[in-house]
Image (cartoon, grey):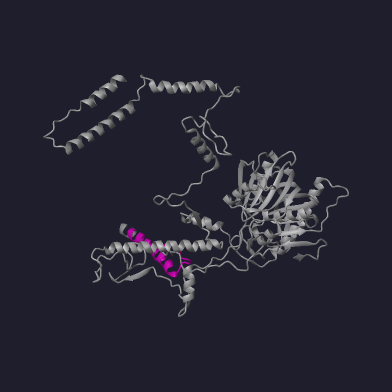
């Protein structure tokens, strides 16, 4: 016996439809959580990453001691959380003697683990330790510039993987149009050695230059840290092929307020807002208005003179 | 992939992601540079890369907007994996297949239709709708119609049947879609429990432990407590012989307090409250009394109505009064 379960409210239905698979996907939500033991540094790292991704991140504050992403059994809580919060990237922090200040960045495909990268955080400098002109502070949710420097990103397997994961984490959404006045942040990631990556977040200062293109200046504002690659698990080939599949179909866009009639051709609806004619200000004083004022003035003058005549 | 040929460094700029990569830069490692040197070098290279991105970004054709110039970005070059699989097209429902075969087109219904009975335009659905079949006041009888049958009830039944059939068809269509993995996003198919129809109940699964417990109980429920019963070959001894008992630990830890004291206190309280004469549960006594009174009153009424009041003498209920007094005295 099967029963059809549907959302009881329209809002619930809309939420479910948002979570359904779509042809063209919007940005991935990030889940930040930590394990049984965390260090102060790691707590700070997680909160600052959360601030960088304010609109599209979920931060859990409880300790989770049954998560081991690299082991086969320990991923089920992560998959459960991913399903609950609809997050496809997670950042899991834990601290132990063997792996101090450990950060595991992972991605999900269909709420199952797709790939993992484990890095150690060293030389972390939080947001507060940078002093800069507050006017330059980047706004929340702005699309960042991302720069990768170093031959390591091509040569070393793990760094290549890390590059892809960091791009996925930091790039926000794929947008078609962008407002040029709103570009104000940049992430600079450089591979200083085959297993160490330097990460920093800067604000952009645009200066006037001769041409249309302004001169850019980087001012370090945000958290900066050294990432030391520890382990990584690339996605297996079949899953990767499936996840990279794109469809040639474009999402159907409904054209509203247009009807096609075989007799009359294409008909459209235009909706005009209510024009409050009585309250509108006249754009230019027409002759009639001027004359009225002149006459009113004259009448006042006549009345005054009439009164004086009667008085006298 | 755009390769800047003017500069000696080769950069790859991906405008869709606003990303720039310099894969040919080597950080000098012979005199291992200090941290500040490294950072300054990174920032310097970063500035170059950002300048390159800005160069291509600001030269794109822009449209003017209220907040600033808008540019249309090209699609990104670096492909990232999806987070959910591609949506599958849903299979056509049974009606859709039939309609396609017969060539039936979908027709859009208007919100208002003409009602012949009243001669006005009414809405097509909802309260006071046009051409409503349930709202006819008179149904004319046909010559071959059954006089016992209620036509209104029959109409209602027919409608109910139609609705049930439609629900069944809907479920079948959804099951078919679920088989192809194309269930609509806001629908879930959930399994419900089997219906309890008459004598047939859903077969309940019994676990191994439960069976063991039951077997043990059965084994000890003989006159001699199951000691002298013949056991089958390979039968294990009963799991729980006798009562469940809790033994207190020999050595008590700190901070728990005296468990033995608690145990004896509990038993004492139970005994005392059962036979205590001082504490009377007044509410309980009152309810017991009223309930008994009601019962007797009903009994009296029934008896009085059943028998003829003239023939039999009215029996005075001495018994009830005496029992009440006796109870009050006793407590």
Q: Position of residue A184 (x, y in %)?
A: 67, 55
A239, above or below B289, in the image: below
Quadrant that contains the N terminus of chain B = bottom right
Quadrant that contains the C terminus of chain B = top left
B212, above or below B166, in the image: above
* Residue farthest toward the bottom in the current orientation of the protein: A263
Q: Magenta part mainly helix, strand or loop?
A: helix
Q: Of residues A104 and B255, which is closer to you in this image?
A: B255
Q: Position of residue A31 (x, y in %)?
A: 62, 49
Q: Give the extent of the magenta segment.
A: A278-307
Residue at horizontal 43 percent and vertical 61 percent from the top: B167
Q: Report if residue A32 is visible in the image.
A: yes
* Residue farthest toward the left in the current orientation of the protein: B310
A254, above or below A136, in the image: below
Q: Of residues B156 and A285, which is closer to you in this image?
A: B156
* Residue farthest toward the right in the current orientation of the protein: B30
Q: Report if residue A212 is visible in the image.
A: no
User: Does the magenta segment cover residue B294?
Assistant: no
B184 to the left or right of A275: right
B91, above or below A33, in the image: below
Q: Residue A35: which quarter of the image?
A: top right
Residue at horizontal 26 percent and vertical 34 percent from the top: B295
Q: How many marks?
A: 0
Q: Of residues A89 and A190, which is closer to you in this image?
A: A89
Q: Position of residue B254 (x, y in %)?
A: 60, 22
User: Does the magenta segment cover residue A282?
Assistant: yes
A119 to the left or right of B113: right
Q: Position of residue A7 (x, y in %)?
A: 48, 55
């Amino acid at each position: 016996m099967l029963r059809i379960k549907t959302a009881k409210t329209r809002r619930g239905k809309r939420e479910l439809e948002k979570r359904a698979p779509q042809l063209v996907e919007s940005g991935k939500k990030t889940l930040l959580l930590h394990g049984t033991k965390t260090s102060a540094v790691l707590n700070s790292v997680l909160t600052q990453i959360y601030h960088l991704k304010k609109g599209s991140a979920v931060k859990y504050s409880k300790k989770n001691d049954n998560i081991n992403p690299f082991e086969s059994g320990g991923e089920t809580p992560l998959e459960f959380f991913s399903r609950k919060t609809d997050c496809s990237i997670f950042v899991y922090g834990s601290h132990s003697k063997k792996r101090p200040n450990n950060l595991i960045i992972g991605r999900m495909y269909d709420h199952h683990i797709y790939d993992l990268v484990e890095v150690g955080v060293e030389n972390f400098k939080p947001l507060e330790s940078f002093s800069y002109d507050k006017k330059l502070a980047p706004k929340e949710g702005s699309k960042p510039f991302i720069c990768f420097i170093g031959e390591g990103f091509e040569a070393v397997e793990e760094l290549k993987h890390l590059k892809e994961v960091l791009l996925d984490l930091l790039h926000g959404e794929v947008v078609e149009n962008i407002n040029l006045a709103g570009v104000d942040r940049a992430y600079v990631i450089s591979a200083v050695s085959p297993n160490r990556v330097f990460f920093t977040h800067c604000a952009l200062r645009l200066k006037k230059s001769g041409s249309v293109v302004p001169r850019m200046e980087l001012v370090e504002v945000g958290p900066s840290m050294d990432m030391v690659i520890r382990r990584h698990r690339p996605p297996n080939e079949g899953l990767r092929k499936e996840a990279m599949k794109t469809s040639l179909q474009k999402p159907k866009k409904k054209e509203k307020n247009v009807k096609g009639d075989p007799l009359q051709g294409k008909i459209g609806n235009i909706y005009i807002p209510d024009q409050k004619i009585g309250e509108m200000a006249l754009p230019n004083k027409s002759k009639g208005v001027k004359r009225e004022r002149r006459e009113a003035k004259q009448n006042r003058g006549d009345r005054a003179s009439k009164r004086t005549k009667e008085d006298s | 992939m755009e390769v800047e040929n003017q500069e000696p460094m080769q950069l790859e700029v991906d405008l869709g992601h606003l990303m720039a990569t310099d894969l040919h830069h080597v950080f000098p490692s012979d005199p291992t540079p200090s941290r500040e040197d490294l950072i300054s070098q990174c920032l310097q290279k970063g500035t170059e890369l950002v300048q390159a991105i800005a160069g291509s970004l600001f030269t794109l054709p822009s449209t003017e907007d209220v907040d600033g110039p808008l540019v249309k970005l090209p699609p990104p070059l670096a492909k990232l994996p999806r987070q959910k699989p591609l949506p599958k097209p849903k299979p056509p429902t049974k009606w859709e297949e039939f309609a396609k075969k017969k060539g039936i087109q979908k027709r859009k219904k208007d919100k208002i239709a003409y009602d012949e009975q009243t001669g006005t335009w009414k809405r097509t659905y909802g309260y006071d709708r046009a051409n409503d079949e349930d709202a006819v006041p008179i149904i004319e009888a046909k010559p071959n119609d059954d006089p016992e049958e209620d036509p209104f009830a029959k109409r209602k039944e027919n409608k109910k049947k139609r609705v049930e059939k439609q629900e069944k068809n809907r479920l079948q269509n959804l099951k078919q879609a679920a088989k192809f993995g194309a269930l609509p996003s806001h629908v879930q198919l959930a399994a419900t429990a089997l219906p309890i129809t008459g004598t047939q109940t859903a077969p309940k699964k019994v676990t191994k432990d439960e069976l063991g417990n039951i077997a043990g109980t059965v084994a000890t429920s003989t006159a001699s407590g199951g000691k002298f019963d013949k056991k089958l070959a390979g039968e294990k001894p009963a799991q729980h012989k006798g009562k469940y008992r809790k033994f207190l630990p020999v050595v008590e830890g700190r901070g728990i307090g005296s468990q033995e004291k608690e145990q004896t206190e509990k038993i004492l309280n139970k005994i005392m409250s059962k036979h205590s004469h001082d504490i009377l549960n007044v509410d309980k006594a009152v309810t017991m009394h009223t309930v008994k009174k009601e019962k007797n009153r009903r009994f009296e009424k029934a008896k009085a109505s059943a028998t003829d009041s003239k023939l039999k003498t009215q029996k005075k209920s001495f018994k009830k009064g005496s029992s009440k007094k006796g109870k009050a005295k006793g407590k």
